[in-house]
Structures are given as structure tokens and as C-alpha cells.
Amino acid sequence: MEQKKLIVLTGPTAAGKTKLSIALAKRIGAEIISADSMQVYRGMDIGSAKIRPEEMEGVKHHLIDVLDPSQPFDVVQFQRLAKEAIDEITGRGRIPVIVGGTGFYIQSVIYDIDFGSGDSDDTDRSFRRMLEEKDPYVLHAMLEKADPEAALAIHPNNVRRTIRALEYLQQTGGKISEHNRREREKESPYQLRYFVLTEDRARIYERIDRRVDRMLEEGLENEVRTLVKQGMTSGMTSMKGLGYAEMLRYLSGEIPYEEAVRLIKRNTRHFAKRQLTWFRREKNVIWIDRGEYGCDDGRILERMLSIINGPSSLKEYGNHFASGPERDRIPEGSKQSGNHPGQEPEDSRMRKDGRNT
């Protein structure tokens, strides 16, 4: 069976993915699947930098405005919805393009990662209830003792992932870190082109600060006030997003407004740094440094199209790419391909998410 075509356009926050993704989709006859953990929520438009209808320019988008902010959302749900969207898009003879900066979400799809049976009928409900009653840091300490590698990868505040890791251990007797390592070694079931858009870090940070200022001007505070009036609380998945968590702290009287703004900018810069770290670990990614193209989206698009319509496999492409006259920059510490203990792959001839993300 012929592999389905799949393009990924990702990179750190404020790298300029949105405008480029629209231009790409229009050129190749594609539809966009948003890989953003906050843009799935209705009524959370400003803080998530959600693309506006007029900015879509007629390109169909998926996984935007599909949940109420009171509903939980995680990588397992994303994977299911994204795979459904891929089937729907390819069924219409079009090409799916995943656009967004949530690297784990992207990885879950392009390698069809098996997350185990944490939510299956075999789940021990009493064990889960016992875990849910514990303090997040107690849970994380339990995981650190049972699976230190997984504990390093999961933040103590990510209770859902911590519980899933402990459930996996209880159900299978194995460590979820070992399971995940095996999953990352899998080859992609897709004909894949995996682009990471980046730029000089100082310019990205400058753009982040401008973006936060624009969000505040557009009414981020009022957006969060409305969500609070609708019953949203800090414990909900939706309210843990950048901008929302900090503004909630301000509205609750915990910190002054100026401190909330400072934290939004700082935390977003830290997030962009973590995104770059994540993508450097991935294998077979194609780095596109905006600076090397004069930040000209037209030149970048033509380069991407030449790659998309190029050699039939990333191994073949990798050699071509490395010896080409206009080699895209691979950030220091990363390799041309295959530079992680398991993670990303390939594609053949082939004919996205918040504003300027």
C-alpha cells in the first residue's frame, strides 16, 4: 500500500509559521492540521494567537475550535483527531500539512506512537482514583523512584502524564520510558517532509515580546476575565496555557499586572528555547533558517517546494541537501539527520495555526 503524504511545518513560537503555511497550502493543494494544544479551545483566540478566518485565505483548517475550555485535552486525543483529519484530507485527494509548535503532538502522529493502555477497559479505576487523590509532587516522587528517566521527561505539574506513566507500570510491569524509546525508533508510516522554521534567537525573542504586547492591546485580559466568568479555573488544562495562567494569577490578586506581563514574556521565551531543544533532538528534520533567506517568505517557500518535490526518500534527500549550494542551517549540537535516540523520517514527490506562530 502506498504511504500517505504528510508535510510538517513547525518551529519555535513566533518563527513565522502561519503566513508561510498558508502560502504553502495554496501552492500544493493542502489542508492544515493545527498542532497547538490551546487552539483546540473555543473562546481562547487572543492568548493562543489563533488564526483568524480572514487570514486562512480559503485554506481549510482542522483541530481549531473543537473543544470547550472546560474539557481536558492531551496528546492521545490529539493523535486520534489528527489521524482522522489526515484520513479525511487524503480521502479528498489533498495533502495534509501539520502546522504548530507542540513537538510531542507532532511526534505522536508522524511515528504513530502507541501510548499504551492507560485509558483502556483494563484500567484499574481504583488505582487511578488513588493516584488522583495525591499531591502532584508526591505523584512525581513515586514516578522518580519507579522510572527515573520518565520523571526527568515529565514536569511535576503534568499530572495526567505522570498518572499515565504510573498506570503503565502497574498494568504492564514495564517502564513507560523504555516503551517510549522503542516507539521513537519506529519508522514513519508516512511519506514525510518535516520542516523546522527558525531564526536568530534574539530576533525570535524580540518578536515574542511584540506579540505579547499585541495580545494585551487586543484584549487578552478581557478574554481571560470572560473565561473565568464562564467557570474556568487554574486547574483546567486550558488555563495552564501561556498567557492564560499568568493572567489568571493577576486576576486572582496573586501578582500585579506588570508582573503578569513580565512573566508571560519570560515564560514564552523559555518555551521557545525548549521548542528548539526538542526539535534539535529529532531525526530527519529539515531546518530552514529565515535569516539565510533574508526573511523572505517567497524564497523560503520556493526552497520548501524544491525539497517537497525532490528525492523520494529523506536519506537520499539528506545527501543532496548536505551538498547543495544553499544548505539550510542545522543549529549547533544537532546533526543533519538521525541525531536523537529515536525520532523522525521520510517522503516522495508531493505536488496551519496561530498568527505568525
Image (cartoon, helix red, strand yellow):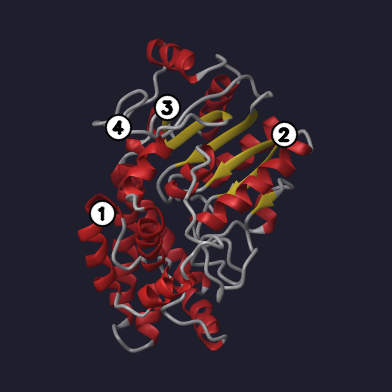
Instruction: Determine contact: label 2, label 3, CB under 8 Å.
Output: no
Q: Report which residue position mark 1 lands on.
A: 147
Query: How far apart are the two marked residues, 2 and 3, measured between alpha carbons?
Result: 24 Å
Q: Earlier in the sequence, mark 4 or mark 2?
A: 2
- The location of residue 222, given as percent across then percent down, is 51, 80
In-front residue for pair 289/154: 154
Q: Earlier in the sequence, mark 2 or mark 3?
A: 2
Query: How far apart are the two marked residues, 3 and 1, measured between alpha carbons?
Result: 28 Å
Q: Nearer the viewer, mark 4 or mark 1?
A: 1
- Name the residue furthest right: 92
Location of residue 96 by image quarter: top right
Rate crowding at label 1 as few (under 14), some (14 to 19) or many (20 or more) other CA atoms within 10 Å. Answer: many
Circle number at residue 31 = none
Is 225 placed above or below 189 here?
below
Rate crowding at label 2 as few (under 14), some (14 to 19) or many (20 or more) other CA atoms within 10 Å. Answer: some
Q: Report which residue position mark 2 lands on.
A: 29
Q: Earlier in the sequence, mark 4 or mark 1?
A: 1
Which residue does the image show at 52% across and 31% down from the upper left? Answer: 188
Q: Earlier in the sequence, mark 4 or mark 3?
A: 3
**Secondary structure type for disc 4:** loop
Q: Earlier in the sequence, mark 3 or mark 1?
A: 1
Query: How far apart are the two marked residues, 4 and 1, measured between alpha carbons?
Result: 31 Å
Kind of residue indicated by mark 3: Asn
Q: Report which residue position mark 3 lands on.
A: 284
Q: Report which residue position mark 4 lands on.
A: 331
Kind of residue indicated by mark 2: Gly
